[in-house]
Amino acid sequence: MRFVLFYHSLVSDWNHGNAHFLRGVVRELLARGHEVRVLEPADGWSRTNMLAEAGEEAVAAFHAAFPGLTSRTYDPAAPDLDATLDRVLDEADVVVVHEWTEPELVAALGRRRAGGARFRLLFHDTHHRIVSRPAEMERMDLSAYDGVLAFGEVLSERYRSLGWGNRAWTWHEAADTALFRPIAGEPAEGDLVWIGNWGDDERTAELREYLLEPVRTLGLRARIHGVRYPDHALESLRRAGIAYAGWLPNHQAPGVFARHAVTVHVPRRPYVEALPGIPTIRVFEALACGIPLVCAPWDDAEGLFRPGTDYLVARDGQAMGERLRAVLHDREQAESLARHGLETIRARHTCAHRVDELLAVCAVLAAPHFAAEPERENTH
């Protein structure tokens, strides 16, 4: 089949964790013989910030790490955008549109589908805005879309409540295990590493309780990678004795995990309070790389993993310190966590599994009884 994917960026993962999943899905589709075209805005915030920080060398590094993966940039305001769309959509079978795509382009693609375009049109939601900031999502005209791919059941249920019925599918993120895998023989560089952004005050208190304070109390050798750290956050890291190492290109994460003994997951507040069952890509990354993981509280409502077996859960900051100490001093426990977490990823949560799910959705959309226009009370 011919897939056309409109995403925020394939090339840049600067403050764009979904790039990991997109790259893995594209890699897997290509490996199965499908044709894939990826389009990204030339001035997208992730790509713009990556170029400002690392220049064209970052683009070259992406192509070196992902040979065969390419994208085409477009200008959302270009007068010839329609002509560009004509070329890229020619003979497309499935078009997937990421929720960070400009609302005007979301609507334009819908108009083409409503006008008789043969491709099936899917909207891919990988954020919490439909629950946390619904007014923003009301700008998206999805009235002609064939379905929604949402990265958690709670989001799928929200779309179903808005009239999407059986056209809203849960499509979790997953690990690109061609890249994210255990690496043996790396020299040890520290006790704990955490990869993530400060989070726009969505988890400031949680980071202090579950990361900074345990590291300080235990005197761990710790490193943090991420972007968008304000001055007060950097000062907090300094006081906790944590080294701040800045942006880490996603393809380098497996090596960094291999050089540390443990990592943690500190979910943002909206995911804990409003989106149970949705882990971020960082959980999949860590488990796929075979590094022991300790999580701040989150509700695995969909049973994706085996809490206590694949990873440990700390109910509060004191428990986080106790769990970290145990993992660092009990090699048998650390090896058990790493082994079982990797086992679950390989059994259920690889990009190959998600491509199987995507192709199953495509088969449903191609069935005769799905040919009619969907009936929805609300299209947003």
Image (cartoon, rainbow, N blue to C red):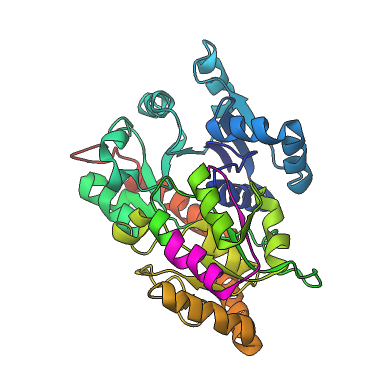
Looking at the image, can residue 90 be seen? no
- Relative image position of residue 314 (x, y in whole percent): 43, 75
Q: Residue furthest front?
A: 239
Q: Residue at x 29, y 41 (%)?
A: 133
Q: Residue at point 73% right, 46% down?
A: 66
What range of the chain is rendered magenta? 207-229
The image shows residue 20 at horizontal and vertical percentages of: 59, 51
Q: Where is residue 13 drawn, in percent x and y?
A: 60, 43
Q: Is residue 318 above or below residue 100?
A: below
Q: Is residue 208 above or below residue 234?
A: below
Image quadrant occupied by the N terminus: top right
Image check: 131 left or right of 307?
left
- The answer to whether residue 98 is magenta is no
Query: Who is closer to the viewer here, 41 or 192?
Result: 192
Residue 186 versus residue 361: which sits nearer the camera?
A: 186
User: How many numbered marks are there?
Assistant: 0
Q: Residue furthest left?
A: 377
Locate residue 361 relative to residue 370 in the image: left or right: right
